[in-house]
Image (tube, rainbow, N blue to C red):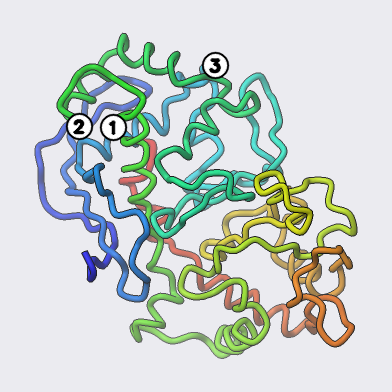
């Protein structure tokens, strides 16, 4: 699988059937789902070992992802907090909104290129993509349910037994296959066809302002937001507060040195996935850049990259902020955002 170059490619027809989660209407899905590593990406971490990607498994995972009946009050699906038009984040919601109008404590992260991650969530609380959904399913302020309840529901609700048989060979639903199906859907979400990618493939060129922004980005931001994933997948304290109320990574490691550290998020599709930061405190890219320009606080765990030469943050002029913003917008992948194979309907 060394040169497994991943992308989702749609190829011709298979006779698989897919059932809509709301109406139970069975409709044909004619595309073959493939996972191909983009040429400018490293090898994926998740390789579908023991969970071979199939059309049936992908379609089942998609149906489960959008089925609000899996939540305690039948109101919240995975897709409620992870909206495709927002890069599978939650547009305009500072924190996730769960069952019974409960508010979570962190901003819903984007869902794509998950196959390249070894840890998940803002604090790295999960280390295996296949167990990631358990958090959302069981959290009292997200779906508020449990695996046993959901498995019982699925075993007694058509057409799920039939769909599980098509995907995994058995009509008896179990939690392992439930999680595998969800993983097939989410791991197949690959975003790698933005203008930036096309420039890297020499299919087009940046505008002058975008190119100036790209150079600034490489000089000032790329240490944390490393190409091509636009995250180094580490955890840092970026000086949001002098004293971090949310302890972030420390809740997982119990290390004082990790207090207030959060996952460096990808910048791909950042134009669409506001608000920003783990608590959604900034609703525009301009406010994010102004934070780095003049808002960084001298937290005891502040990342060294934000405190150089006795100066906090990353000094940026208004013109530089505009140029960087122009570059960041080249990371929007319209093809991924509008790809109907990921859509609810």
- Please name the residue shown 65% across and 32% down the image: 97
Q: Earlier in the sequence, mark 3 or mark 1?
A: 1
Q: Give the SS element for disc 2.
A: helix
Judge by depth and name the residue closer to the eye, 315 or 179: 179
| Residue topped by disc 2 | 167
Q: Quadrant of residue 288?
A: bottom right
Residue 314 to residue 134: above or below: below
**Circle 1 Cα neighbour tier, 10 Å, few/some/many (<14 / 14–19 / ≥20):** many
Give above or below for 86 relative to 200: above
Residue at 59% from the left image edge and 84% from the top image edge: 218
Give the CA distance from mark 2 to mark 1. Answer: 7 Å
Residue sitting nearer the eye, 59 or 118:
118
* Foreground pick, 254 / 196: 254
| Residue of label 3 | 72
Q: Is residue 310 left or right of 43 when viewed as pictured?
A: right
Q: Residue at x 49, y 29 (%)?
A: 77
User: Looking at the picture, how far across and down is residue 265, in whole percent?
Assistant: 59, 60
The earlier-in-sequence mark between 2 and 1 is 1
Q: Is residue 152 above or below residue 25?
A: above
- Of circles 2 and 1, the one toward us is 2
Q: Which of marks 2 and 3 is nearer the N terminus?
A: 3
When the figure is inspected, residue 245 is found, relative to residue 311, above or below; the finding is above
In-front residue for pair 246/215: 246
Label at residue 108: none
Residue 84 % position (x, y) = 47, 47
Q: Distance between the residues labelled 2 and 3?
A: 25 Å
Question: Can you identify the residue that label 1 sits on?
Answer: 60
């Amino acid at each position: 699988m060394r040169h497994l170059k991943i992308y989702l490619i749609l190829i011709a027809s298979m006779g698989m059937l897919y059932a809509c989660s709301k109406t139970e209407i069975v409709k044909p899905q004619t595309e073959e789902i493939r996972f191909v590593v983009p040429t400018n990406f490293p090898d994926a971490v998740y390789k579908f070992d023991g969970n071979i990607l199939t059309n049936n498994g992908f379609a089942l995972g998609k149906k489960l992802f959008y089925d609000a009946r899996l939540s305690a009050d039948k109101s919240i699906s995975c897709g409620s907090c992870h909206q495709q038009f927002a890069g599978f984040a939650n547009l305009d919601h500072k924190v996730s909104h769960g069952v019974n109008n409960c508010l979570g404590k962190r901003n819903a992260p984007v869902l794509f290129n998950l196959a390249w991650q070894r840890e998940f969530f803002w604090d790295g609380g999960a280390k295996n993509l296949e167990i990631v959904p358990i958090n959302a399913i069981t959290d009292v302020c997200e779906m508020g349910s449990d695996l046993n309840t959901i498995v019982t529901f699925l075993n007694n609700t058509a057409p799920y037994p039939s769909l599980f048989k098509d995907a995994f060979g058995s009509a008896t639903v179990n939690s392992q296959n439930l999680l595998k199906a969800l993983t097939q859907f989410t791991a197949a979400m690959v975003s790698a066809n933005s203008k930036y990618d096309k420039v890297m493939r020499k299919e087009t060129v940046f505008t002058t302002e975008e190119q100036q922004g790209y150079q600034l980005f490489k000089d000032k931001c790329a240490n944390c937001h490393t190409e091509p994933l636009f995250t180094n997948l580490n955890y840092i304290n970026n000086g949001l507060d002098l004293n971090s109320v949310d302890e972030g990574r420390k809740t997982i490691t119990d290390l004082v040195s990790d207090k207030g550290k959060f996952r460096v998020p990808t910048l791909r599709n950042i134009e669409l996935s506001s608000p920003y930061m783990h608590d959604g405190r900034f609703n525009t890219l301009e406010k994010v850049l102004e934070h780095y320009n003049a808002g960084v606080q001298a937290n005891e765990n502040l990342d060294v990259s934000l405190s150089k030469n006795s100066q906090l943050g990353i000094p940026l002029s208004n013109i530089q902020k505009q140029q960087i913003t122009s570059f960041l917008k080249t990371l929007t992948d319209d093809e991924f955002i509008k790809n109907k194979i990921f859509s609810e309907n």
